[in-house]
Image (spheres, grey):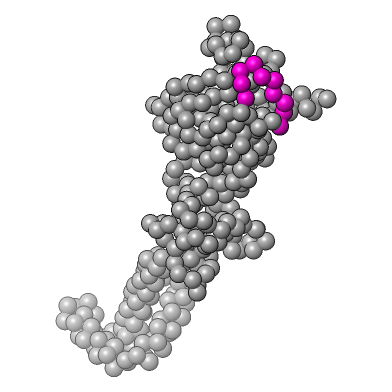
Amino acid sequence: MHSPRIQSFISVSTDRIKILLGRINLSFFIKLKTRLSSYLEYKGLITQNTPERSISFSLYRKLAVCLLFLGIVLWTKDINTIPIPQPLILSHYEHPDISGIKYTFNNYESLYRVGKYAIGKFRAMVPNNQQIQNYVQETLALHNLKSISESRLSLGNPIPKGTTIEFFPPANIHNPRYKKDIRAFNYFMSMVDDSYAYITGVWAERGAGGSSSKHEGVDVAAKLGARIISPMDGVAWVRNINLGGRTVGIESENSLLLFCHMGKRFVKSGQKIKKGQVIGTVGMSGRTSGPHLHVSYGIRFPNGSLFGRHRYKWTDPMLWFYRQQYFSSSL
Ligand SMILES: [Zn+2]
């Protein structure tokens, strides 16, 4: 037989279930018990000599235990199949102290453009297209949640003029290098006179997927016609390049900064340039899908490519930024 502990557990459970079942339909179970007793008697499993009370108890116990386990199985199964409730509010609603970036849209302004600017501000990184897409959707969903009285905005339609959308930190884009990157990114963004500029590309040995060509520079997306400001003193060299379009190079000591895809150019070859001087405007010359400033950094190299008076090898413009940092901090 069972150990006393199990037996007492079973009897307690049985009692509880009996009470429960008694409330539902006792007569059904009495009938069931009688039927079972006569069936078992017929099968010869019990004899008439067995006291009926003990039979009924043992039957009740078995039945109760079966029902109990069945109940537990059904109960746990039920819990597992119920979807876990997801929080309806997004993470930043739990932190109302996080202030977003409010932007009021003009005609035909792209939600993606401002979205990319916001990602840059919050995360200082160049995310992939899927991440940008997700962030824009997240932003719209959040906006539609907030302004219940206003009409819904959707991705398929342009944002109506005068609509203000608040952009919050992306829930799913994180950049552990944020503090390091943001200083460099701000430096490159300061080369254009556009407070909504953002970085769309950095130095890459290989493009996304490892197949496309490498990218030898930093791209600063800015509005067409935004002024380009020289970050240093030097001598200007003006060239027109196939891919880079209208280009200005500024030479200083052993290095050269190239500015490509320009619209207008306000300098001539051989002209001395001062730090902070406007050298031209952001354009779309050369191969580009949108207005942006491409910045390349060349260091003087015997077998490099010729630009102005010297030959250069192209390297990561971030190195130029760190070099500037080094010299300004050691002054
Ligand atoms: Zn570029």
Q: Up-down: is 171 above or below 42?
A: above
In the shown orientation, is residue 138 left or right of residue 312? left
In the shown orientation, is residue 140 left or right of residue 190? left
Residue reaching furthest left? 42
Q: Is residue 213 visible?
A: yes
Q: Nearer the viewer, residue 94 or 47?
A: 94
Which quadrant: the N terminus?
bottom left
In the shown orientation, is residue 48 left or right of residue 128? left
Which quadrant: the C terminus?
top right
Residue reaching furthest right? 331
How many numbered dots are placed on residues in this image? 0
Q: Up-down: is 56 above or below 170?
A: below
Q: Is residue 202 visible?
A: no
Residue 178, located in which quarter of the rendered image?
Answer: top right
Residue 279, located in which quarter of the rendered image?
Answer: top right
Q: Nearer the viewer, residue 204 or 32?
A: 204
Residue 17 is a magenta residue: no
Q: Residue at x 34, y 76 (%)?
A: 67
User: x and y percent of residue 328 in the render?
Assistant: 78, 27
For the stretch drawn in magenta, the main secondary structure is loop
Residue reaching furthest top? 302
User: x and y percent of residue 74 in the render?
Assistant: 35, 71
Residue reaching furthest bottom? 27
User: x and y percent of residue 151 in the render?
Assistant: 45, 69
Q: Up-down: is 203 above or below 254?
A: below
Q: Residue at x 58, y 42 (%)?
A: 197
Q: Please provide the residue range marked out in magenta.
A: 267-276
Q: Nearer the viewer, residue 154 or 326?
A: 154
